[in-house]
Image (spheres, rainbow, N blue to C red):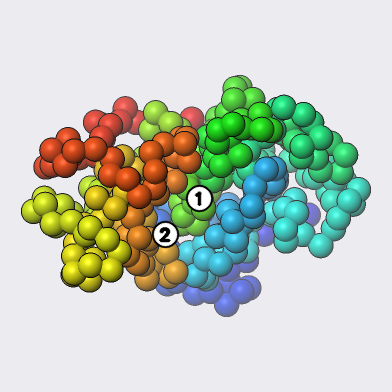
Amino acid sequence: MALPTLNKQLQASGISRRTFLKFCATTASLLALPQSAVADLATALGNARRPSVIWLPFQECTGCTEAILRSHAPTLESLIFDHISLDYQHTIMAAAGEQAEDARRAAMKAHKGQYLLLVDGSVPMGNPGYSTISGMSNVDMLRESAKDAAGIIAIGTCASFGGIPKANPNPTGAVAVSDIITDKPIVNISGCPPLPIAITAVLVHYLTFKRFPDLDELQRPLAFFGESIHDRCYRRPFFEQRKFAKSFDDEGAKNGWCLFELGCKGPETFNACATVKWNQGTSFPIESGHPCLGCSEPDFWDKSSFYQALGPWEWYKSKPGKGAQKHAGKNS
């Protein structure tokens, strides 16, 4: 029996056509698609049947899973996550042990060449015993699960670049997913944790166009990683005026001045935190009074102190974020 389309599932859930179209319009905007694409997005997505998704958790803190589970729904994130066939995800699945592994292998067999593989956490290469699932090392499970996947989404900085487990001295020999799998299209959605809506948007794009969106040189979706935090920060005018907070409780901090001298990594960090924000669009770290840590960039943990300025103000004045030259868009 054929699985119902997304349209039918939404109707059965009491979600109106109007709400669905608003979701499509918002997603098209986030992906920098033209307004004319909204109708095509709604048609293709509405007629799509539940795709099989396998989510592997490796060396991680479960923060990436928590981010997507705590997203404000149903208009965006859970609208999609309620209607994909999430056939394997340790944190939220009822099965455990061999029963869980049987479900993973059954999904791989039933949807060979069509399922999407999501991975969060780095992969330890120093010793297989550092991280295992049902007696299988992370690297062996990754290779087995990736073999017949249509594509891979690396969720979070650990899966994308190695993250905190890879930080010096890297005791487990942690590596990124792309260091192991080189023959599949991979999208990196970095961040510690990543923005839930970036994950959703990439899934929607894939369901609609059967390919991943345009990516930057680090395989991240350009729609979310094409500009630096600095480029979109509401404190940018204070930066240009050279008005900096000197401590977290001085008058500058109280007046919302720039946090550059307190170590903000916004000029060298690419992500959409400043525009999409967190907690139902309420805020993001800089708006809450804390400098950006640069968590969506490779090796962020081993760079200069979180509370040390990046460099002289003159290096960044009236310029886009360092390395913000135009990215050559490409898709997988």
Establish if 254 lies above or below 133.
Answer: below
Establish if 41 lies above or below 270.
Answer: below
Which residue is depicted at the point 39% across and 47% down? 306
Label 2: few (<14), some (14–19) or many (≥20) C-alpha neighbours in 10 Å: many
Left or right: where does residue 94 sit relative to residue 142? right
User: Outermost residue, bottom direction?
Assistant: 14
Left or right: where does residue 162 sit relative to residue 50? left
Q: CA distance from mark 2 to mark 1?
A: 27 Å
Left or right: where does residue 157 sit relative to residue 177? left
The numbered disc on residue 192 is 1
Q: Is residue 29 visible?
A: no
Which residue is depicted at the point 86% across and 55% down? 96
Residue nearest the viewer, comparing 296 with 304: 304
Residue nearest the viewer, comparing 322 with 116: 322
Type of amino acid under label 2: Cys
User: Quarter of the image holding residue 268?
Assistant: top left
User: Outermost residue, left direction?
Assistant: 241
User: The N terminus lies in which quarter of the figure?
Assistant: bottom right
Which residue does the numbered mark 2 point to in the structure image?
24
**Residue depth check, mark 2 versus mark 1: number of the one nearer the observer:** 1
Q: How many marks?
A: 2
The numbered disc on residue 247 is none
User: Outermost residue, right direction?
Assistant: 98
The first of marks 2 and 1 along the sequence is: 2
Label 1: few (<14), some (14–19) or many (≥20) C-alpha neighbours in 10 Å: many
Establish if 88 lies above or below 318.
Answer: below
Q: Secondary structure at mark 1?
A: loop
Type of amino acid under label 1: Cys
